[in-house]
Image (cartoon, rainbow, N blue to C red):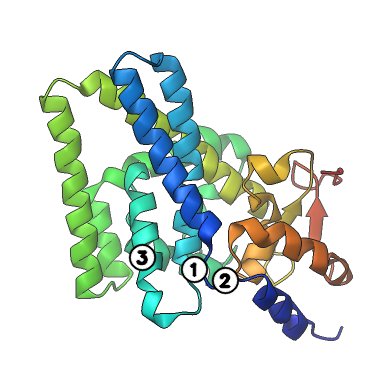
Amino acid sequence: MESTTRFEAEVARRHTPDIAWPTIALLAGCLGLWLLSSALSLAGFLPLWLAMVLNTLALYAIYTPVHDASHSAVVPRNKRLRWVNTVVGTLAAFPIFMFFHTHRKSHFIHHAQTNAPGDPDTFLMGNFWAVVLVKTPWSLINQLNGVKLWQSCRDLKLTPAERRDTLLAYGLTIVLLLGLIASGHGLELLTLWIIPWFVGEHVMEVTFGWFPHHDHSETGRYRDTRISLFPGADLLYLQQNLHLIHHMLPVVPFYRYRAVFDELRPTLERHGARIEGFWPGSRPTAP
């Protein structure tokens, strides 16, 4: 079959802005919602349960700016402003206990070796219930494991500056968490940050990692991930139901996946891409 990668790249170019303002707005909205709902709850103006729900939604969605920034999809062209990607990624990663430089390097390896030996996302492979109940919770707990973080800095060969920034961010995080506990705000920390982080990122990991890639057995440009079409998917998944578009053309920001998919769908179908429904292997339904 004739290669269509040049055409696909041209479509991506047309849908890649100089600055992805919606990604920056999503970061600002998530941070703002998390901080505002927490402040209102602490002041007694918002029920604690409602603040927990709002914070969970915010910390679920905030990974998307991390993801875009990892691929320099926030500012993809202007070299003088490429630092904006690092700022966006670092700010978005902080509330969910991620560390931008290690995540970015690990994520690049995932793209290069998707579903193959060496893919670092092994905790998202396998039986759905094992991933949901065991593998993902254990991975989340280990995000605050300083020894593992130091090992990741070493194994991923971060530059001295990247390693310094990563360990500094980790140190500040630990100091903040311990400070909140020592000052008598342990319950507030648990209900307004820890639980929303754990639930929100848990759902994110499954929707970003397990659903688009399962059964993690195929490799290749058009088969290592899939398209998942069902009502409400674009909103619920922040267009990660169109994850194949991201793996093919990672410089495209998340909010343009649908437009790119609609334009490339005939090409994808000719190449045998996986266009399915909610569950891997199911039939697609109209969005």
Gap in Å between the C-alphas at discs 2 and 1?
Answer: 6 Å
Residue for point 65% across, 54% down:
213
Inspect the image, locate mark 1, and give the three-letter code of the amino acid beneath it.
Answer: His
- Give the left or right position of residue 104, taking residue 8 as reference: left
Of mark 2 and mark 1, the one earlier in the sequence is 1
Q: Quadrant of residue 59?
A: top left
Tag 2 and tag 1, C-beta contact below 8 Å: yes
Gap in Å between the C-alphas at discs 1 and 3?
Answer: 10 Å
Which residue is denoted by mark 3 in the rendering?
86
Which residue is denoted by mark 2 in the rendering?
251
Query: Where does residue 226 sit, x and y in percent of width and height?
Result: 72, 57
Of 216 and 201, the residue lying toward us: 201
> In the structure shown, which secondary structural element does the residue marked by tag 3 occupy?
helix
Which residue is denoted by mark 1 in the rendering?
71
Of mark 3 and mark 2, the one earlier in the sequence is 3
Q: Is residue 225 visible?
A: no
